[in-house]
Image (spheres, rainbow, N blue to C red):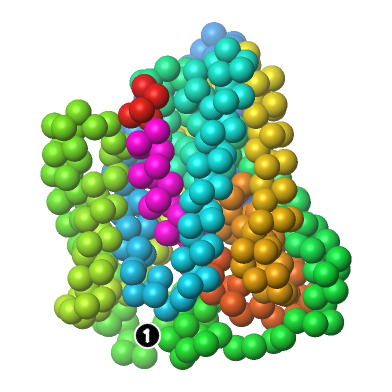
Amino acid sequence: MKLDLIQTVAFAGIVLFLGYGIRRLVPPLARYNIPAPVIGGLIVAGILTWARFQGTTLIEFDTTLQSPMMVAFFTSIGFAASLRLLKVGGPQVLIFLVAASLFAVAQNVLGAGLAVAMGLHPLFGVLTGSVTLTGGPATGLAFAPLFEANGVPGAATVAVASAMVGIVMGGVIGAPIATRIIERNNLRQRHARQPVDTPLAQEVMEEQLADDPLKTPQGEDEESFALLQSVVLILVAMWLGSFVSSWFAGMKFTLPAYIGAMLVAAVIRNLDDVTGVFKIQQRVIDDIGNVALALFIVMALMTLKLWEIANLAGPMIVILAAQVALIAVICVWPMFRLMGRDYDSAVMSGGFCGFMLGTTANAMANMRSLVERYGPAPRAFLVVPMVGAFFIDVINAVMITAIVNMLK
């Protein structure tokens, strides 16, 4: 059976909600923050792989919209790269971002070094480094074609496997590491429960912690206008970004498809912060980006060739074990000291472990479990999501692109 473009997206939507249903029925999947699109997509990939070994092809997909969905998601990340928010976070956000960026480099150096030692292409180690650990499954799948074209066979499957291991381990070790830091330094008794420094910072923190969808007092028409404006802004950024990407391609600089759109979106966002012309509502843009991300991941996973990484399982285990050990050591020692050696710093270490191995959802889950036991950590809930949700993604994408161009 061959599905056309619309049928493929519709099928992906059904598979996505299948993933949500399974995650509800199997609590450990939710506890370790395994994304619903990954659950549903891998089930379909497994069924299609089984069918292939039986000598039949059950379904063929038209994945024309897969790439635009991916670009739309990363464009929404670009709109979140506000220098104003970076300034609001103060020196600690900058310190945390610089540290995360440097340790992402360390992930790549470690991965590439181990890959070369085992006779593999160094980009295999990079793919199991910051691409999939700091970046998560979305970044891994977005860069997979670039890595495959430059000597990493089965890159998409490797990316998903690496990201899943990272998500699980980031959820497993993050909170225990932070708990050990808190107890060892007696921070449970000594930490001060201070509010964040400014009203604007408090507002940003509350936005990061909010679970409810956008609610505007102006009514449905205002919400519809914000949605329409956000969709158009994303499309315009994608349109202009295609010219930026073409310009880089003309300079013989290899880029993933979304970089141009992400850069244009960041420029539009920061111009709007200064002029207030669009009054961009970031949460609406985030919602659109999350929808695009979910459908992109499902469509990408449905077409995985799981059989391609059978002979790479051993090297992956070695590299990922080393990566987990590296982040654990970083959280226990330099991160805690860099961020101030106080209670908030300990909570940030747990969050750092979450998003440097998994996703921002892991980071938030780790920190929530800590504050439920030990008390509020407002500074941690301002700094970690601000860096983990978008700033590190922008820097990671640029860094990965530069590495691929050096090692290809």
Rendered location of residue 365, percent (x, y): 67, 63
Q: Residue 166 at x, y = what percent?
A: 64, 42
Q: How many marks?
A: 1
Position of 253 with respect to 371 (left or right) is left
Residue toward you, 361 or 112? 112
| Residue position marked by numbered label 1 in the rendering | 216
Q: Residue at x 26, y 53 (%)?
A: 263
Let me know if residue 100 appears in the view.
Answer: yes
Q: Amino acid at mark 1?
A: Thr
Image location of residue 337, percent across then percent down: 67, 64
Q: Is residue 261 above or below residue 372?
A: above
Within the magenta stretch, is there residue 231?
Answer: no
Whether residue 396 appears in magenta in the rendering, the answer is yes
Residue count near mark 1 (Cα–Cα under 10 Å), binned few <14, some 14–19, many ≥20: few
Q: Which residues are magenta?
A: 385-403
Q: Residue at x 61, y 17 (%)?
A: 117
Q: Main secondary structure of the magenta part?
A: helix
Q: Could you say which is closer to the camera, residue 393 or residue 61?
A: 393
- The image shows residue 53, relative to residue 87, as above or below, that is above
The answer to whether residue 242 is left or right of residue 386 is left
- Is the C terminus in the top left, top right, bottom left or bottom right quadrant? top left
Q: Residue at x 83, y 61 (%)?
A: 180
- The quarter of the picture where the N terminus appears is top left
> Where's residue 318, x and y in %?
69, 26
- Which residue is painted at 52% across and 45% down in the image? 104
